[in-house]
Image (tube, helix red, strand yellow):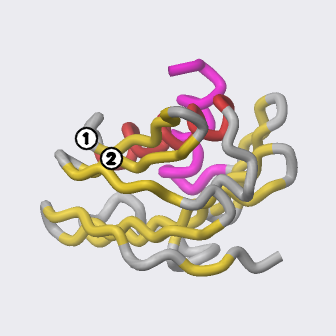
Amino acid sequence: MRKVSIEIAKAFINGKKKTVGNTDTANGEIYLHNNKIAWNWENNHPDLKSKNIHLYFSMCGWDTVTTRERLNTLFYELFKSDLVYLKQSKGDQYLYINTTCMEIDPSKVYVLREIGDDLFLDEPVALAI
């Protein structure tokens, strides 16, 4: 994990505004090159320290190493586990949750929900531009 990604993830989780290089976080949102790649379910009212997390994320059509790295670091810092991560294989994007692997569309929005000790992935939604 890169230092910039760790700083951004921690600022996001703590509801702080921070800009490091090409990545910004404020008001419960993370932007990479002005593309919103992650946000919480109650925009402007983060409740990410509770055990009821609704995290929206998208690669915004940019399935790059940097986008995956920013999101993977956020997943790790937020869920305190390396059991949730994105990976590319043969040009396709995959999301791993625990032992489940699913192909994802980098242009869609996904929602990870943690309720208690359980983690769920909601159905994807079209990216609103």
Q: Give the side of residue 12 with respect to residue 99, left or right.
A: right
Q: Which residues are magenta?
A: 1-16
Q: Give the side of residue 98 with respect to residue 128, left or right.
A: left
Query: Residue drawn 86% across and 52% down?
Result: 34
Most extreme residue toward the top is 2
- The quadrant the C terminus occupies is bottom right
Query: Residue drawn 75% across and 79% down?
Result: 128
Q: Nearer the viewer, residue 12 or 104?
A: 104
What secondary structure is the magenta-colored segment mainly?
helix
Q: Is residue 86 magenta?
A: no
Three-letter amino acid code of the residue under disc 1: Leu
Q: Nearer the viewer, residue 90 or 71?
A: 90
According to the image, label 1 marks what residue?
83
The relative height of residue 20 versus residue 29 in the rendered view (above or below) is above
Label 1, secondary structure: give it. loop
Q: Where on the picture, by quarter, is residue 4?
A: top right
The relative height of residue 41 versus residue 107 in the rendered view (above or below) is below
Q: Nearer the viewer, residue 85 or 52?
A: 85
Three-letter amino acid code of the residue under disc 2: Tyr
Most extreme residue toward the left is 117
- Residue 18 location, x and y as percent? 73, 42
Q: Residues within 10 Å of mark 2 (few under 14, many from 20)?
A: some
According to the image, label 2 marks what residue?
96
Q: Is residue 9 magenta?
A: yes
Label 2, secondary structure: give it. strand
Report the Cα–Cα distance between label 1 and label 2: 7 Å
